[in-house]
Image: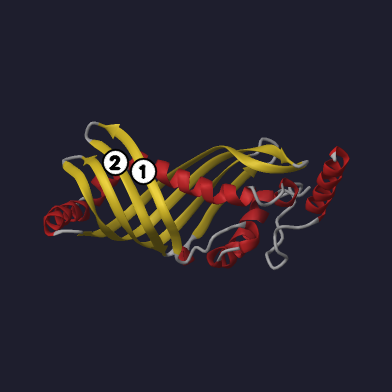
Amino acid sequence: MKFYLIFICCILQVLVINSKVIPKRLPQLCRKSHPSYNDCMTKVLKKWGPYLLKGIREINFPRMYPLEIPLFLVNRTISPSVSVSAAIRDFEAWGYEGLELKTFNFEAESLTGDVSLYLPYLRISYDFDISGRILTLPLDNSGHFKGNFTDLDLYFNFALKPVERLGVTFYHFEDFRGRGTIGNGHIQLYGNGTDDQVILDGMANFYNLNPGLVTNAVQPIYDESIGVFYRGLIQTVLDSVPAQELLPE
């Protein structure tokens, strides 16, 4: 029985090593020995854009137009005047078709890198249950959110580490940090009752008059949220594609 299990594991290892996960329809990733690796990868990733937008089933990358998230939880306290606990459901975002890769830098020896992205426009909607406080605004409401945002910049720094599964090496994030800025925005909040609506209208008006002030107040929450989301999104891909395919010699 033991020999049988070892035999099966060996067969599986050979199959994984000799099979390609990334579909052939995608532009080939650059070899790490390429003399201008970062420039090469920047061009390749830009060519991947239309495929990423539609989703790539083979590497478990979801469709990005629209981007859909069934449930997202936020629980963060920055100070006595800024704290948020929220359950976000049926999240949808439109605008990723305009996503631009600005810079890509990766050091193959240290497995560290950074990426910057730009979104000219993003439209978001979701249902929410929220409690806490943002500056002078107490939060204890549920309802529906709609927002339009422009000039979004996203920055990510990351470090990878190799891990082995069934004798095959994959990459895992050892560290991943996100940071973002929003140029401008306009939101609408819809409550589940008349009393809620009065409060939510006040909250929406406060943001629409002071988008920069509110964004700065919740910046750590925003940065942490985009870091958690994009880390999970990309880690799913890393778990699906062997390291030798992502970073060929």
Residue 180: x and y in percent read 41, 47
Identify residue for label 2: 84
Q: Which residue is mark 1?
A: 74
* Observer-nearest of 111 and 17: 17
Q: Quadrant of the N terminus?
A: top right
Report x, y in % for residue 22.
Answer: 70, 59
Task: Say left or right for 64 vs 8.
Answer: left
Q: Indicate the position of residue 23 as horizontal and vertical percent values.
A: 70, 63
Residue in the image at 71% along x and 57% along y: 21
Q: Residue at x 40, y 50 (%)?
A: 72
Q: Residue furthest front?
A: 1
User: Along the line of sight, which residue is nearer the eye, 156 or 235?
Assistant: 235
Mark 1 and mark 2: span between their CA atoms?
A: 7 Å
Q: Residues within 10 Å of mark 2 (few under 14, many from 20)?
A: some
CB under 8 Å between callouts 1 and 2? yes
Q: Is residue 247 left or right of residue 203?
A: right
Q: Give left or right: position of 151 versus 166.
A: left
Secondary structure, mark 2, is: strand
Of labels 1 and 2, earlier in sequence is 1
Residue at the spot x=75%, y=48% of the render? 244
Can residue 164 be seen by looking at this rendering? yes
Placement of 148 over or under 161, stated as above or below: below
Q: Residue at x 76, y 58 (%)?
A: 20
Q: What kind of residue is marked 2? A: Val
Q: Going by the picture, which residue comes out furthest to the top?
A: 80
- Three-letter amino acid code at the position of disc 1: Val
Looking at the image, can residue 104 be seen? no
